Amino acid sequence: MARPKADLPASEAVQALIDGEGRLAVRVTPGARVEALEIAEGKLLAKVRAKPQDGKANDAVRGMLAAALGLAPSRLELLRGATSREKQFKVAG
């Protein structure tokens, strides 16, 4: 059975959470049943199916963020939180 596509908020809503220096904070839930990005109480929450081993969950979050922002995944750099649920990405450009 094919996986359903991730549920993504509007690009403008995600872009509004990027600070003046191009940083985006994300709270991640790895190993979730569904993949989704949601905005709750002014924070971006990411749920990914990937398990947190060998950077797979980080790569999945980067891919979802890139899709939501309409960017290539290479334009997002993980600044902080490689082994934490609280992550911070730098959005290039």
Image: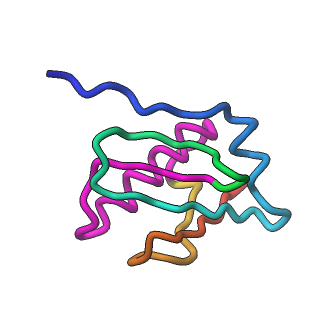
Query: Which x, y percent locates residue 66?
Result: 54, 45
* Magenta span of residues: 44-73
Residue at 51% from the left image edge and 54% from the top image edge: 74
Which residue is situated farthest in the right direction here?
Answer: 20
Quick one: 18 or 34, which is closer to the camera? Answer: 34
Query: Which x, y percent locates residue 52?
Result: 28, 66
Is residue 57 covered in magenta? yes
Q: Quadrant of the N terminus?
A: top left
Is residue 82 covered in magenta? no
Query: Which x, y percent locates residue 49?
Result: 29, 48
Residue at 73% from the left image edge and 39% from the top image edge: 13
Which residue is situated farthest in the left direction here?
Answer: 1
Relative vertical location of residue 90 with respect to residue 6 in this rendering, above or below: below
Which residue is situated farthest in the top direction here?
Answer: 1
Residue at 45% from the left image edge and 40% from the top image edge: 36
Q: Is residue 56 left or right of residue 1?
A: right
Relative vertical location of residue 43 with respect to residue 77 in this rendering, above or below: above
Quadrant in which residue 26 is drawn: bottom right
